[in-house]
Image: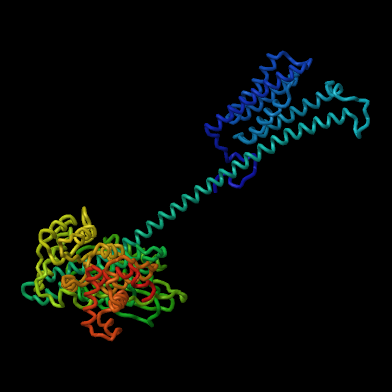
């Protein structure tokens, strides 16, 4: 708590009021000047009125100056100014200076300032008490010894309850008590108000600091969680790929089948790593995600996938067994993910650090109120590559994962090997996560042929555009291994892609999105807008982002595929786009339709040349296309042959001036032919 917060003791020296700003001192000086002018004017008026006992005007003017100018320093030296003004005020009474109103205002302001701004509360109280007692004492003595009351009232008038002398004396004492009491009360109230205000400001600043610290802790915690996720995914999968790559290199010449199996494992593991990274990034990009969304929903991994992890470990060359003990029960998603990641990291460490021929065992035990996980290895027969304790982030991440779900972990050598034991208490009220959804499989978003024909009769010329040379090399190897596809050129930037497209006139351009300089989306717009080019663009990107997808379609791209697609899917995508169809996975098609279907209906432009040329049947086919239906589904709905549907689709594309089916769907929603909400 801030010093002085809520305190009311006037003798408390624990808090000192902050001095006023420079503007406050300027205000004091201006106030003193105004009072000086007013007091001088009052003295002049009283003197002109003909008071017989008034001192010389010069003396009265000096008195006015001495009474008012010290007020310019009243908040710098409140006690000193109050004492000086009290003495000057009494001196004016003794000299019978013909002024009372502004003199009393100056004295009241000085006494108030002592209470409101006095830093030493004992001194402030003492000064006010001494001045008040001295003034009252002087008043009483004056009432007894001086004849000013007698001259002002008649002693013989007895019409009131009290004698005139007593009444006048009582009025003088009461007015002085109110004067000094008011100065004391208002001064104390100002001091206490300033004290409470400063305490409130300090508390507000403290809360702001705490809020900032909490925000920084939340960011730090989120970064640690992301670091753990990325470390677990990358370290595990790269470790497996390294083992498999080494195995493939060793057996490539003498056992091509084993080499091919290892390469297939590398491909599968790389795809799994990308999928898990995608899940992490999706959770991070979720606008309405909860603070713990990453840990709760960034992965579908859990205890149910431990057997798959063990199978993958066996496939990577580390013999591993799995044993489940006890009656299986629901495990919360966060707990399951933490246990999976701990097992994954532990097996990665075994591959890295255990000796040759090491074996591992994963044991999962369901207890009444807890779940336990053990990962142990026998150390192998060869020399250890390194101490597991040196894993740094891996061990720290495992400890943090266990602590995050209320569990504890023990790690250390056991015999010749190493043991990781983690236990997490389970509450009966916890609920497990739902089943994960299946991953979409890429396929052509458009079934059926266009006017270019159903089968490829010429070789497909492909231009590869990517800023990473290794990616271009990999895609070249995949595509050139397919009969009928020729890679005629490469480009590293969007600008190079435009230039190479004009030089080579490829059938398909495989375009990356993120590139230095001109990006892939801008390059796509330039290429599609060039009437002299007949090239179609297939977007290949690492990140499955909606903004990339819709920007690519708006730019005129004919396909959208992730780089972690299989070689077969890449080849099929190039062939589909080359035929003039749209290459979109079912998931992407659904997202496109949902985006347009969820928006408001748009009015139909009456002056579009292609809309009026559509027949009723073609409009009907276009509406069904906008629902994502295939040619076969449309044929069944309209009771016509599939070849008839293909003909209608070709005519629709020609009349609307669009490249493919997905562009036709976009056109239908943007021009009001397909009505949102009617799917």
Q: Residue furthest left?
A: 253
Residue 222 is drawn in which quadrant?
A: bottom left
Left or right of 561, for residue 126: right
In this view of the protein, can residue 381 be seen by the observer?
no
The picture places residue 309, in percent across and down from the top left corner, at 27, 74
Task: Give the residue furthest to the bottom.
Answer: 639
Residue 266 image point, x, y percent: 18, 70
Between 309 and 26, the residue placed more toward the observer is: 26
Which of 108 and 620 lies nearest the eye of the viewer?
A: 620
Image check: 261 left or right of 182? left
Quadrant of res 171: top right
Q: Residue at x 29, y 84 (%)?
A: 638
Q: How many marks?
A: 0
Would you place residue 427 above or below residue 22 in this image?
A: below
> Depth check: 290 or 318 in front?
290
Instruction: Find residue 165 and report its horizontal and vertical position in percent.
Output: 87, 27
């Amino acid at each position: 708590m801030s010093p002085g917060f809520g305190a009311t003791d006037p003798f408390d020296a624990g808090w000192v009021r902050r001095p006023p700003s420079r503007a406050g001192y300027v205000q004091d000086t201006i106030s003193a000047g105004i009072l000086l002018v007013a007091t001088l004017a009052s003295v002049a008026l009283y003197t002109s009125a003909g008071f017989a006992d008034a001192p010389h005007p010069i003396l009265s003017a000096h008195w006015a100056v001495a009474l008012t100018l010290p007020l310019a320093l009243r908040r710098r030296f409140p006690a000193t100014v109050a004492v000086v003004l009290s003495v000057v005020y009494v001196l004016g009474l003794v000299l019978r200076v013909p002024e009372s109103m502004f003199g009393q205002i100056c004295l009241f302001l000085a006494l108030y300032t002592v209470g409101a701004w006095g830093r030493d509360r004992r001194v402030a109280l003492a000064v006010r008490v001494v001045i008040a007692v001295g003034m009252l004492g002087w008043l009483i003595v004056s009432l007894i010894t001086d004849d000013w009351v007698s001259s002002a009232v008649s002693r013989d008038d007895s019409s009131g309850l009290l004698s005139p002398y007593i009444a006048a004396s009582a009025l003088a004492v009461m007015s002085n008590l109110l004067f000094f009491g008011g100065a004391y009360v208002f001064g104390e109230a100002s001091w206490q108000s300033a004290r409470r205000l400063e305490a409130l400001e300090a508390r507000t600043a403290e809360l702001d600091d705490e809020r900032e610290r909490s925000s920084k802790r939340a960011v730090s915690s989120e970064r640690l969680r992301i670091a753990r996720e990325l470390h677990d995914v990358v370290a595990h999968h790269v470790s497996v790929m390294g083992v498999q790559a080494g195995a493939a290199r060793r057996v490539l010449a003498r056992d091509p089948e084993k080499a091919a199996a290892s390469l297939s494992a590398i491909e599968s593991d790389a795809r799994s790593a990308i999928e898990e990274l995608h899940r992490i990034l999706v959770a991070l990009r979720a606008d309405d995600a909860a603070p713990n969304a990453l840990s709760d929903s960034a992965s579908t991994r859990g205890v149910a996938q431990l057997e798959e992890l063990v199978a993958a470990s066996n496939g990577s060359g580390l013999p591993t067994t799995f044993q489940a003990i006890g009656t299986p029960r629901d495990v919360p998603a966060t707990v399951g993910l933490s246990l999976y990641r701990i097992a994954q990291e532990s097996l990665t460490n075994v591959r890295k650090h255990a000796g040759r021929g090491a074996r591992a065992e994963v044991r999962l035990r369901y207890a009444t109120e807890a779940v336990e996980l053990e990962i142990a290895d026998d150390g192998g027969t060869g020399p250890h590559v390194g101490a597991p304790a040196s894993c740094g982030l891996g061990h720290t991440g495992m400890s943090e994962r266990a602590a995050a779900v209320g569990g504890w972990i023990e790690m250390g050598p056991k015999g010749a090997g190493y043991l990781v034991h983690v236990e997490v208490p389970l509450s009966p009220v916890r609920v497990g996560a739902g089943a994960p959804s299946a991953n979409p499989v890429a396929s052509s978003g458009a079934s059926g042929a266009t006017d270019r024909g159903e089968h490829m009769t010429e070789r497909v010329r492909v231009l590869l555009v990517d800023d990473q040379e290794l990616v271009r090399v990999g895609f070249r190897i995949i595509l050139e291994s397919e009969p009928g596809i020729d890679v005629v050129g490469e480009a590293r930037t969007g600008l190079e892609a435009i230039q190479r497209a004009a030089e080579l006139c490829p059938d398909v351009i495989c375009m990356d999105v993120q590139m230095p300089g001109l990006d892939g989306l801008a390059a796509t717009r330039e290429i599609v807008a060039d009437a002299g080019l007949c090239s179609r663009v297939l977007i290949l990107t690492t990140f499955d982002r909606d903004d990339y997808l819709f920007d690519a379609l708006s730019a005129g791209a004919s396909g959208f595929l992730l780089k972690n697609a299989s070689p077969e899917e890449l080849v099929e995508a190039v062939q589909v786009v080359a035929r003039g169809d749209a290459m979109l996975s079912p998931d992407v098609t659904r997202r496109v339709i949902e985006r347009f279907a969820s928006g408001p209906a748009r009015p139909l432009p009456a002056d579009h040349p292609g809309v009026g040329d559509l027949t009723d049947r073609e409009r009907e086919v276009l509406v069904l296309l906008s629902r994502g239906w295939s040619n076969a589904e449309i044929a069944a709905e309209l009771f016509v042959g599939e070849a008839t549907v293909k003909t209608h689709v070709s005519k629709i594309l020609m009349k609307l001036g669009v490249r493919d089916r997905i562009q036709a769907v976009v056109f239908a929603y943007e021009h009001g032919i397909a009505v949102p909400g009617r799917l």
